[in-house]
Image (cartoon, rainbow, N blue to C red):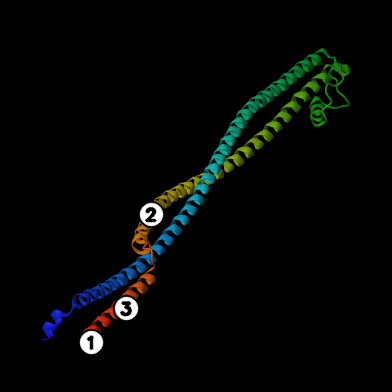
């Protein structure tokens, strides 16, 4: 009898459809809940990844820019040091050239002065011997009881006054010439010694300066090499990080299509589905109540 009534139930197909629809909606709800949880997790993870990678790219770019600027500054400093060293080498070469020329001139001057003194002394000796033999004592010209050697010694020590008066005779003139040659030798020797000292001082100081600049240049070159290598390494790292960021951005676009761009929010869809299920359940209850009534 029950089977017969069920067969005659005009709402059985409708109720079955409603039940099936409720089941399907519940399955959709469960599936969407799982999808929502997945999306929430993936979106949060992707957001963190995008933010981290973007921050890393920014930091790497900033560091690369800073090191690139440092490398450029080091290049300028290295070039300046090289220029200073080249200039100093030129000055050393010029100083050496001048010193050699000056030394040659002074050596010749001293030699000429010595030769001049020898010649004057020889001439004086010859004249003295001649006048001694001739008995012309007046020509010996003993001035104030001083010997020729004593007069020459005082003449060398005395301030230079140029050519002395020739009224005193030939011996006085020879004494003046001898004194001039002796003074020239002494002054040139002193000037040569002073020039040698100044040259050696300059060469020593410039050698020390060159050594310091060479060491500084070497250190800066090594630092620049390390800096450039770091820039190369960071550039590669930035390229890899940028690739990871691009991949995260691409995945975000996919997540938006799957999880975000659905018209209604997840909460709105859940509410609409619940309302639909509730409506179907109420309809089913009404239909089942009709069955009991009949």
Residue 77, percent from left and from top: 55, 43
SS at circle 2: helix
Residue closer to the observer: 36 or 223: 36
Residue under the point 13% across and 79% down: 7
Drawn side of residue 241 relative to residue 188, left or right: left
* First-in-chain label (1 vs 3): 3
Residue 212, percent from left and from top: 56, 45
Residue 9, percent from left and from top: 17, 80
**Rendered-image quadrant of the C terminus:** bottom left
Residue closer to the observer: 39 or 159: 39
- Graded by Cα atoms within 10 Å as few (under 14), some (14 to 19) or many (20 or more), the crowding at tag 2 reads some
SS at circle 3: helix
Asked if residue 43 is positioned above or below residue 70 in the image, the reply reads below
Residue assigned mark 1: 293
Mark 2–mark 3 distance (CA, rounded to whole Å): 45 Å
Mark 2–mark 1 distance (CA, rounded to whole Å): 66 Å
Q: How many marks?
A: 3
Residue under the point 85% across and 20% down: 141
Asked if residue 219 is positioned above or below residue 161 in the image, the reply reads below
> Which image quarter: residue 107?
top right
On residue 114, which mark appears?
A: none
Residue assigned mark 2: 246
User: In front of the other: label 2 or label 3?
Assistant: 3
User: In front of the other: label 1 or label 3?
Assistant: 1
User: In front of the other: label 2 or label 1?
Assistant: 1
Drawn side of residue 181 relative to residue 38, left or right: right
- Graded by Cα atoms within 10 Å as few (under 14), some (14 to 19) or many (20 or more), the crowding at tag 1 reads few
> Which image quarter: residue 46?
bottom left
Residue assigned mark 3: 278
* First-in-chain label (2 vs 3): 2
């Amino acid at each position: 009898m029950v089977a017969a009534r069920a067969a005659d139930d005009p709402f059985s197909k409708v109720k079955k459809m409603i039940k099936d629809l409720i089941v399907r909606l519940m399955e959709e709800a469960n599936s969407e809940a799982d999808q929502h949880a997945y999306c929430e997790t993936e979106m949060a993870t992707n957001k963190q990844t995008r933010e981290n990678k973007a921050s890393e790219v920014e930091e790497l770019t900033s560091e690369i820019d800073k090191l690139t600027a440092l490398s450029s500054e080091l290049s300028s400093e290295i070039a300046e040091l090289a220029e200073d060293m080249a200039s100093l080498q030129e000055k050393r070469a010029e100083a050496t050239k001048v010193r050699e020329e000056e030394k040659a001139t002074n050596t010749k001057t001293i030699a000429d002065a010595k030769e001049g003194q020898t010649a004057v002394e020889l001439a004086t000796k010859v004249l003295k011997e001649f006048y001694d033999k001739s008995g012309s004592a007046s020509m010996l010209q003993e001035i104030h009881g001083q010997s020729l050697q004593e007069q020459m010694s005082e003449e060398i020590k005395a301030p230079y006054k140029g050519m002395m008066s020739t009224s005193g005779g030939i011996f006085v003139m020879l004494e003046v010439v001898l004194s001039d040659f002796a003074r020239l030798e002494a002054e040139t020797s002193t000037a040569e010694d002073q020039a040698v000292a100044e040259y050696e001082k300059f060469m020593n100081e410039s050698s020390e300066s060159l050594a310091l600049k060479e060491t500084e240049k070497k250190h800066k070159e090594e630092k620049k090499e390390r800096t450039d290598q770091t820039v190369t390494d960071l550039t590669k790292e930035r390229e890899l990080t940028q690739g990871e960021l691009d991949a995260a951005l691409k995945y975000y676009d996919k997540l938006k299509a799957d999880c975000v761009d659905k018209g209604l929010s997840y909460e709105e869809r859940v509410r609409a589905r619940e309302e639909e299920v509730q409506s179907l359940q109420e309809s089913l209850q009404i239909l089942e109540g009709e069955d009991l009534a009949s």
